[in-house]
Image (cartoon, coloured by chain):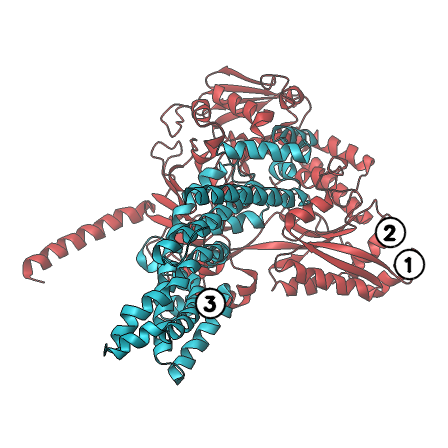
């Protein structure tokens, strides 16, 4: 077990190193010149040159990368070119909002996904099942910005049930969490349905039914916990989807998380922020997968870590 | 509600009406909310240089000079008075007594010296350092070879003497720029590079809260040195709000100013909506949108080709594409700018004459070229209109639609971008003087790698005249100086390095309860509004 964890952590470190290298090289190749960007349109050539030197932008690529890496290992993400603040501070200030949104989205997709999946499985091959599966199909396929704007228009603008974007109260989180969770809902409900249908054909379910246990009790006591297992593994992978999803959802709803920060930085080519958010996201994805893999054997003793 | 409560409510209501009555008399008090899409970048006056933080900084800090609200007229601010030596080289400013910083300390002449030394110090990385080039000792200070500017001296606590190395007619404008706004040394040193997040100045408001990614709050500074200002108690700047969301919230009365204005796609809907009657204020600004032609790249090194392009562009149609949010232009200077020539005719839209001229230049069959453009709406649509106009005279232009920073980078390369549509990146003057529309964008100094003279136009003769014009610093020469600039700009246009396309109008959208002196919602230097003077009018 410990050996496994250590091996996975080393792997994680190597993955993050790779991500940092690829992101750095991509951003290095962007034609915009950071020194000129910082210097602004009225700067003299002297000013631009000073800035280039102070930031080490005149150094060769590998040296710039090495410097970045050394600072990074000391927890220093550098300073934003345009906002001038420490990138670490900007991300730290916004991370709680993103985490809150993600937790809310996980709850949404779990509750809705499992509920829809179970109902569809129980009512298998009825019009209700068909309807729910069409809904989940749409949920999986619809682009998040479309879903977000649609929800915003219907529930915030027309019905005025929720505020039009922003942050602070429970009412603010409902629509963004729904938007972010709708993909997972679609995904989970389909998984739940097929998993439950599959489990229902197992011998032990037949045994339970044969001894006269009521159908609902069989489903909730014996079938559901087993059908639920694949979903747990999915949550770890979900974090990856969320990391891309929050960029869109946070921008649509004015949610002050790191996705919005990334979107602003991309539009203005603020390289240190783009680097920082990418690395933090990569870190979250790697950790999410690791945690999901570590939890799996506890939930399902049939799984063994190798 | 029982009788006793009713009585109490009545008393409270009377008290409130009375309270409101006194507040109404001088329009003091109240809070407003302003929204923006992007985070506030920095509130350090030496660094902040985008249109969002520009007017915010103006309300936190003050300079020696300022403008009369709603106008381009220079007036002393932190200076009580000033004198200029006969040779135009020495400016002596007497400071207003009793001006306090937000931390309670009184402002002295040494603060002004510290501020100017700091802004030109290369460590500060100020984008505005170049504006101070006329001050004696600038070269040494900006190269980091000297401690500070030898030309700036605090004679005593109330007197600052600034010596220039050459006469500069724009110098008082430079003293009104944010970059010259006075900062207290002890606070800057305490926060270092984070001063922009902990700004302390002498302005009408002090910053009382900054929650990253959510809001910035300005509160009234009770010791402000101008009597009766500011009018409001508090301004909350909410960030992360899409312009379209801001509009909806404005409609519901939740916010007071949509800082990013009306999104282009919603413009007609909003201006045609009676709900918004009286909420939208239109004004002009110191802006020109133009197409640059790289005068050092064939075939645009040929004057006739450039003139032909100037005659080929249907500017009225482009103005229609952006729903009439601009007026067609025929010269580099915008109409609001001193030196704009009302009688100048420029090149008329005439595709046939353009075609003939192109044939004369040896391109009877036209040629192919590239048109660079920023990739945000409405710029690519405008570029398509330009492309069509060009194809009518036989020029095939391929549109290169890139992120703004990349277009700027391409323009700064000598041989990369033959044509650029400047939309979204066009020049907006830093201060209302024609000189500011020349050097960086049409002078030889801007025609360098990384510069903003994307036409790479360099006429040494005009450069000399421009320098001579800016040396006419004596107030008695002001008119002659503007006349000379007028000539310089029309002569540039005769050489056609640009196609001046339009001057963008400005539309401020705000709640109806906001009011203020004439012109503050279209103030040439404060966008979207002059925060110090705006107030809540209870009449609405």
Q: Mark 1 vs mark 2: which is more N-terminal?
A: 2
Furthest-left residue in this view: B3
Image coords of residue B347 (percent x, y) = 79, 56
Mark number, residue B299? 2
Mark number, residue A147? 3
Chain on which label 2 sits: B
Q: Is residue B220 left or right of residue B364?
A: left
Does residue B476 show up? yes
Quadrant of the image containing the C terminus of chain B: bottom left
Image coords of residue B320 (percent x, y) = 65, 65
Determine the image quadrant of residue A296: bottom left
Tell whether label 2 touches label 1 (CB within 8 Å).
yes
Mark number, residue B205? none
- How far apart are the alpha carbons under marks 1 and 3? 52 Å
Chain coloured red: B
On the same chain, marks 3 and 2? The answer is no
- Name the residue beneath numbered marker 1: B363
Chain on which label 3 sits: A
Query: A172 or B41, which lies in front?
Result: A172
Determine the image quadrant of residue A254: bottom left
Q: Which residue is pictured at 41% across the width and 70% down the height?
A: A195
Image coords of residue B56 (percent x, y) = 47, 41
Query: B469 or A197, which lies in front?
Result: A197
On the same chain, marks 1 and 2? The answer is yes
Q: Counting other residues with Cα less than 10 Å from the Cα at mark 1, is it few (<14), some (14-19), or many (20 or more)?
A: some
């Amino acid at each position: 077990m410990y050996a496994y964890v250590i091996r996975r952590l080393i792997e994680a470190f190597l993955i993050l190193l790779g991500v940092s290298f690829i992101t750095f090289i991509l951003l290095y190749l962007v034609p915009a010149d950071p020194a000129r960007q910082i210097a602004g349109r009225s700067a003299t050539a002297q000013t631009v040159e000073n800035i280039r030197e102070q930031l080490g932008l005149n150094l060769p690529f590998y040296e710039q990368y090495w410097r970045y890496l050394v600072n990074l290992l000391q927890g220093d993400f550098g300073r934003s070119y345009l906002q001038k603040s420490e990138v670490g501070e900007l991300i730290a200030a916004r991370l709680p909002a993103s985490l809150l949104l993600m937790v809310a989205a996980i709850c949404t997709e779990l509750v809705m996904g499992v509920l829809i999946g179970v109902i569809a499985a129980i009512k298998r091959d009825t019009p209700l099942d068909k309807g729910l599966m069409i809904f989940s199909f749409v949920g999986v396929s619809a682009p998040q910005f479309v879903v977000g704007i649609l929800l915003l228009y219907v529930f915030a603008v027309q019905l005025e049930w929720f505020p039009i974007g922003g942050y602070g109260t429970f009412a603010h989180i409902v629509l963004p969490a729904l938007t972010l969770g709708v993909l997972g809902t679609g995904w989970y409900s389909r998984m739940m349905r097929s998993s439950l249908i599959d489990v229902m054909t197992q011998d032990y379910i037949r045994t339970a039914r044969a001894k006269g246990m009521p159908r609902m009790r069989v489903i909730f006591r014996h079938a559901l916990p087993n059908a639920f297992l694949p979903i747990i593994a999915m949550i770890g992978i979900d974090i990856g989807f969320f990391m891309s999803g929050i960029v869109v959802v946070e921008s649509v709803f004015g949610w002050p998380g790191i996705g919005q920060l990334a979107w602003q930085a991309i539009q203005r080519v603020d390289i240190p922020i783009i680097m920082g958010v990418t690395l933090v996201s990569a870190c979250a994805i790697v950790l999410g997968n690791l945690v999901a893999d570590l939890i799996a054997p506890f939930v399902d003793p049939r799984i063994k870590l190798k | 509600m029982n009788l006793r409560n009713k009585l109490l409510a009545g008393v409270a209501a009377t008290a409130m009406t009375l309270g409101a009555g006194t507040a109404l008399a001088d329009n003091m008090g109240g809070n407003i909310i302003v929204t923006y899409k992007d985070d506030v970048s920095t509130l350090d006056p030496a660094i902040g240089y985008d249109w969002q933080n520009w007017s915010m900084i103006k309300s936190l800090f003050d300079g020696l000079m300022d403008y009369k609200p709603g106008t381009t007229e220079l007036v002393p601010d932190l200076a009580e008075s000033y004198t200029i030596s006969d040779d135009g080289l020495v400016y002596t400013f007497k400071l207003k007594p009793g001006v306090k910083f937000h931390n309670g300390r009184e402002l002295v002449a040494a603060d002004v010296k510290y501020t100017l030394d700091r802004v030109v110090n290369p460590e500060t990385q100020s984008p505005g350092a170049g504006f101070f080039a006329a001050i004696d000792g600038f070269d040494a200070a900006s190269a980091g070879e000297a401690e500070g500017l030898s030309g700036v001296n605090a004679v005593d606590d109330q007197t600052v003497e600034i010596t220039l190395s050459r006469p500069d007619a724009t110098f008082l404008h430079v003293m009104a720029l944010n970059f010259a706004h006075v900062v207290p040394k002890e606070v800057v040193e305490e926060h270092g590079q984070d001063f922009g997040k902990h700004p302390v100045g002498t302005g009408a408001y002090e910053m009382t809260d900054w929650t990253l990614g959510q809001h910035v709050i300005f509160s009234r500074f009770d010791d402000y040195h101008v009597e009766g200002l500011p009018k409001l108690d508090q301004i909350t700047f909410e960030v992360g709000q899409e312009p379209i969301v801001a509009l909806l919230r404005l409609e519901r009365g939740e916010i007071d100013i949509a800082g990013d204005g009306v999104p282009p796609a919603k413009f007609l809907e909003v201006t045609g909506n009676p709900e918004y009657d009286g909420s939208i204020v239109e004004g002009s600004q110191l802006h020109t949108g133009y197409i640059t032609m790289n005068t050092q790249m064939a075939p645009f090194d040929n004057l006739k080709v450039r003139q032909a392009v100037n005659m080929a562009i249907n500017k009225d149609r482009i103005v229609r594409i952006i729903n009439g949010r601009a007026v067609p232009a025929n010269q580099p200077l915008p109409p609001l700018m001193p030196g704009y020539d009302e009688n100048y005719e420029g090149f008329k839209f005439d595709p046939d004459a353009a075609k003939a001229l192109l044939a004369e230049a040896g391109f009877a069959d036209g040629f192919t070229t590239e048109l660079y453009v920023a990739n945000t709406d409405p710029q690519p649509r405008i570029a398509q209109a330009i492309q069509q106009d060009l194809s009518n005279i036989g020029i095939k232009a391929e549109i290169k639609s890139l992120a703004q920073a990349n277009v700027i980078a391409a323009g700064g390369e000598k041989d990369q971008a033959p044509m650029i549509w400047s939309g979204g990146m066009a020049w907006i003057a830093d201060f209302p003087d024609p000189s500011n529309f020349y050097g960086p964008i049409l002078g030889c100094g801007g025609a360098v790698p990384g510069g903003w003279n994307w036409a790479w136009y360099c006429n040494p003769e005009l450069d000399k005249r421009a320098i001579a014009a800016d040396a006419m610093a004596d107030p008695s020469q002001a008119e002659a100086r503007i006349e000379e600039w007028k000539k310089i700009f029309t002569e540039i246009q005769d050489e056609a390095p640009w196609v001046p396309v339009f001057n963008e109008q400005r539309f401020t959208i705000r709640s109806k309860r906001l009011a203020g002196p004439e012109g503050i919602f279209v103030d040439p230097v404060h966008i979207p509004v002059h925060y110090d003077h705006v107030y809540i009018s209870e009449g609405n």
